[in-house]
Amino acid sequence: MDLGPLPQLVVSGILTGLLFALISVGLTLIFGVMDVVNFAHGEFLMLAMYLTFGLALVGLNPIFALPFVALAAFVLGAIVYRLLIRRLLDGPPSTVVFGTFGLLVFLQGAAQYFFTSDYRSVPNPPFQGTLHLGNVALGEAQLIAGLGALVMTALVFAFVEFTEPGRALRALSEDRVAAQLMGIDVQRMNALAFGLGTACVGAAGALLMLTYPAFPRVGTEFALTAFVVVALGGFGSVQGALLGAILVGLVEVLGGFYISPALKLIPVYALYLVVVLLRPQGLLGRR
Amino acid sequence: MNAAAPFLEVRGLSKRFGSLRALDGINLDVPHGGLTALIGPNGAGKTTAFNCISGALRPSEGSIRFEGHEIAGAPYHRVARLGVVRTYQVVQPFAEMTVLDAVTVGALLHHPRVSEARAFAGETIEALGLGSKRDTIARSLTIADKKRLELARALATEPQLLLLDEVMAGLTPTECAAAVELLRGLVAREITIVMVEHVMEVLMPLADHVVVLATGKIIFDGKPRDAVNDPAVIDAYLGRP
Amino acid sequence: MTPRSHGLALGIVVVALAALALGYHNAFVLNLVFVGLIYAVLGQSWNWISGYAGQISFGHALFFGCGAYASALFGVHHGSPWLALPAGALVAAALALAVGFPCFGLRGHYFSIATIAVAAIAEIAVNNIGALGKANGFEMPILAPSLASLQFDDKGQYVLMALVLFAIAQIGTITLERSRLGYYLRAIRANQEAAASVGVDARAAKLATFAAGAALAALAGSLYAQQTLYVGPEDTLALPISIAIALVGVVGGLSTVWGPALGALVYVALARYGGAVLGGQGHGLDLLLYGGLILVIVSWRPDGLAGIGGSIRRFVRRRSAETPA
Ligand SMILES: Nc1ncnc2c1ncn2[C@@H]1O[C@H](COP(=O)(O)OP(=O)(O)OP(=O)(O)O)[C@@H](O)[C@H]1O
Ligand SMILES: [Mg+2]
């Protein structure tokens, strides 16, 4: 049986989905622990991409830059939590929404002002070869970005599942009051979660620079998808985010091919609407 | 009112939460007028029964007829419009609203004009002794006043059947006595009351009728003086851990 | 504030801006005033559903776009612009009902993201439908200036039209606050369950509010199109427009009569005027300042600028109370 371009599309969809997964896991982690939807998540991605670009200018391969970028993002995330988010948590729920929106506008404006609106790509990008597996042809860069995202997502997952601080984070997202009674330092854990969530987009930003240019609004594109992914999977559910990301990656690539590239996001949004109208808590979310 | 149809008639009402049977096929008749006491140990299913009758929860099985209308599973607000209104055991005030505004929300049900609704809400608040607090934000009331607000909001809808879930819990003896007078007044105004309360001394002299619920089943249905001597009732109360 | 003092404030604003529109012929300034009024109306229409009813929408540009496209279509097909106004408003209200009916069952963020999804689908669709002009949009034909053609050669006339709409939005809000629906919305926002327990039909109340707000936003869109005579997806339907509307609503203060107007003032002063003065849009400094200001307001005054007004009033009252007579 000839499947035509289907295997190629499925592989490509999964690789795209893995990058979405890394971005979305960061978002859902933050939400799970402190009930905050960080609308500036994509702007951290954008900053990470610029940092990777800067390091590439001095000759660092994005893959080697990744640990530095992720670490820098972690620190930035923790600082933003301490300086801003913590203050917003005391207000009504809409405060956080608009606070992170303000951050989005601010960071985008800053990027436009300091870096201009030009598209910046890594000079002499590495991994330009193409791999052939049967009749599936894969760009090395795309493959490495996807697998890198898989490794990073697995690391985050392992951290949350198997380490002591990870357990504390999970305890917080399951029952905040009980966790507090058990003596968990909520402020510290919130800062950790915000740093970790931001580190996810830090790593994703480095990987993305293998195949994608940096520009001030690049974050919005990816963050929008990440919101849909996270809501689709169920807010706060890491497994849900993984599942949602792969689904969205597949739907986007398949829709782009079989319907039209210009319309590729319509099936993604339609999928979201259908799922939440049938299951208001998302695929794997708790009620 | 259709004379042939009983006032409130519950048949085979069940509510399951997962494997837990909170209500297990209860039958209940509440006549028009008077006060029915619904009692039973903690976790017996009293609040769940109120949730089902008032429309807050959809029953798993069974029928609930109010003045001949089937209301099992009907939308919450529709049941309230028919005249069945409840108060919450754990108070649910409109935290950011003033007492007068919160009670006005109830009064608007039968007084579509805001000015009339506010006037009626003011009278209701006055009658419940909350008059001095009419402009206080609900969040900052004491628990006893919150309970009173809860009652005022329900009364302002001019209900026919009022379901009161532990409105007296936490009141001082003086406050209880005042509440009892108030309830007698409501009964005199032909509002039918079903009341959940743990304070027996208060309840028994008031009640025309007692229903005892234990682990989701009705184990007694009759006159107050018979309830205290009923072996099943004694067992349910004394037998609990 | 009582309805009377709201009315007085509205009267002063309308008279002052009308005087400006008739007496001051600086096109640049009048254009800013026009855009400010349009955004004040949009912010108010958003405030109804997202402030008073507490359902935060990030897809409000959809309704703005309904009005703008209605005007564009009537324009290029030689219909009367006065018919475009009700047509756009009706379509917007119908869309709001169609979206709201299923989506008001969703909680919090799930609803907000659903509004993004619906607006994004509409934007992508418009970008690909020939009859709706695709990405290029429509250039509307220029007609002889008159009230009938709703085209004017003087910018001040557009300001006057926008003022009428602004007054409608403000009077609508003042009325809403004191109406049965206003009480119901506040109750729903505070505790939807408890509201239902005393007979409030939450879904109906939200739907009515959403539809009315959508119609108002569409009227603003129509008027906007009549002034720019160009309508395209980028500047009517896109997500950044939805976000700009929401920010106007929140900067000034949610669920207040004057919040959206204050928010629009800040938006126009910083993002539009600032952008023009600081070297054109796209430069970024305007966004940087606007974003920074939002951060300052949100972290120090979660209730927005109107909240600051309230604090000042209380402060003044306390001071005057302390002053011995
Ligand atoms: N929403 C719910 N989900 C799951 N279980 C519930 C729910 N509501 C009640 N229950 C369970 O149903 C049983 C009956 O509860 P209910 O609140 O009706 O008891 P009650 O008679 O009102 O008790 P109390 O006197 O303590 O108020 C309890 O075991 C309770 O834990
Ligand atoms: Mg109970």
Image (cartoon, grey):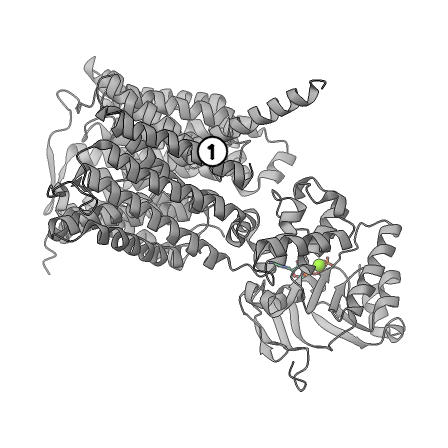
Q: Where is residue B44 shown, x and y percent of the image?
A: 72, 64
Q: Is residue B217 left or right of residue A278?
A: right
- Quick one: which residue is furthest to the bottom in this view? B4
Q: Where is residue A175 shown, x and y percent of the image?
A: 57, 42
Image quadrant assignment for residue C97 = bottom left
Image quadrant assignment for residue C95 = bottom left
Picture quarter with the C terminus of chain C: top right
Identity of the amino acid at label 1? Ala
State which chain disc 1 sits on: C
Q: Where is residue B85 shown, x and y percent of the image?
A: 65, 64
Q: Is residue B175 left or right of residue C95?
A: right
**CB of mark 1 near ligand 1 (< 8 Å):** no
| Label 1: how many Cα within 10 Å (few below 14, some 14–19, many 20+) | few
SS state under label 1 = helix
From this view, report whether residue B28 is shown above or below residue A257. Answer: below
Q: Which residue is located at x 55 percent, y 59 percent?
A: C200
- Looking at the image, which is closer to me, A155 or A116? A116
- Quick one: which residue is furthest to the top in this view? A58
Quadrant observed for ligand 1 in the rendered image: bottom right
- Looking at the image, which is closer to me, B77 or B170? B77
Q: Which residue is located at x 19 percent, y 35 percent?
A: A142
Q: Is residue A283 left or right of residue C4?
A: left
Report the number of discs. 1
Residue A159 appears in view: no
Picture quarter with the N terminus of chain C: top right
Q: Where is residue B34 shown, x and y percent of the image?
A: 79, 72
Q: Which residue is located at x 24 percent, y 21 percent?
A: C276
Residue C97 appears in view: yes
- Looking at the image, which is closer to me, A189 or C320? C320
Q: Dot 1 corresponds to which residue?
A: C9
- Looking at the image, which is closer to me, C211 or B42? C211
Q: Is residue A257 left or right of residue C210?
A: left
